[in-house]
Amino acid sequence: MRLRSVGMGEGGTPLVLLHGLFGQAQNFSGVQRALAASRRVLALDLRNHGASPHDAEMSYPAMAADVAETLAAEGATPAILLGHSMGGKVAMTLALTRPDLVARLVVVDIAPVDYPPAFRPYAEAMLALPLTPGLTRRQADAGLAAAIPSPGVRGFLLQNLDLGGAVPAWRNGLAQTAAALSVIEAAPPCSDGAGYPGPTLIMAGETSDYIRAEHRPLFRTLFPAARFATVKGAGHWVHAERPEGFLAALGAFLD
């Protein structure tokens, strides 16, 4: 599947940004502009997200294959691959299966392990929202508030709601994504002996518990050249919450 790609900058080894669950390329817009001052930077909408095509299949091998196809079409291989959360699992999958396409790997606040179903209440609330003509963003926000108390999370999710048509609609493949949450929450499949030998940065948010000390041996097995960095004051959405720290850690790795 060819994915929607947003490109900025030119020169150097291409840097490719992969967003997390219910995200889209524009979530990286601020850091992408900063990074594009010195290199070509591509931000992709993964399948069933943003403006990319929809499909019932949401396995990590399928999503990694989408990225490979898109990078080939863009003439952007080998690339520095950076993935946040779900996008980090996609990036790890591609690095482990097609290391020739990945010059360097950056994994942001996710480990190659199973996670609890924390996002299922979000999907259920979004699917239950009545999409009636004339719906306003304020009304949609109020409709999600009981299930999703955090205004920041609601704002993040509502970026996917298109209120410009005659009838409001989720522009992402919400139904397909919701049906595949058990696959998305699981560890990406990994064959025995798989490994990516290239330079790898594992970046965590200081206040997030997505990457834990007990995950480090697994990271080192799969990515023997891995180094670890923690962004102070950041939670799970590292690049949005602490962009300066995110860019500093990334810049040190790239340099």
Image: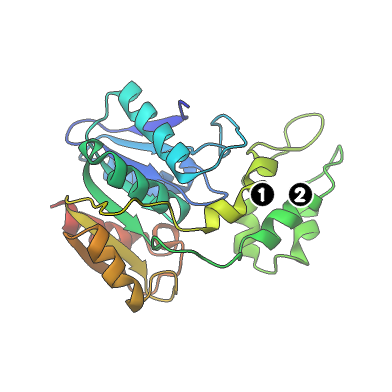
Q: Which residue is rendered at x = 37% and y = 50% of the image?
A: 83
Which amino acid does the dot numbered 1 rest on? Ala
Q: How many marks?
A: 2
Q: For mark 2, give the secondary structure.
A: helix
Please name the residue that numbered disc 1 is placed on. Answer: 178
Q: Which residue is rendered at x = 74% and y = 48% of the image?
A: 137
Q: Is residue 219 left or right of residue 242?
A: left
Q: Is residue 9 left or right of residue 160?
A: left
Q: Position of residue 15 (x, y in %)?
A: 27, 40
C-alpha span from label 1 to label 2: 9 Å
Q: Which residue is rendered at x = 70% and y = 42% of the image?
A: 175
Depth check: give the residue in front, 109 or 35: 109
Q: Position of residue 183 (x, y in %)?
A: 55, 52
Contact (CB < 8 A) between labels 1 and 2?
yes
Which amino acid does the dot numbered 2 rest on? Leu
Please name the residue that numbered disc 2 is placed on. Answer: 127
Q: Which residue is rendered at x = 79% and y = 59% of the image?
A: 142
Residue sticking out furthest to the front: 192
Residue sticking out furthest to the left: 255
Q: Is residue 197 above or below residue 173?
A: below
Instruction: Mark 2: give few (<14), some (14-19) or many (20+) Cα within 10 Å.
Output: some
Q: Earlier in the sequence, mark 1 or mark 2?
A: 2
Mark number displayed over residue 197: none
Q: Which one is closest to the eye, mark 1 or mark 2?
A: 1
Quadrant of the rendered structure where residue 51 is?
Answer: top right
Q: Position of residue 73 (x, y in %)?
A: 34, 21
Instruction: Mark 1: give few (<14), some (14-19) or many (20+) Cα within 10 Å.
Output: many
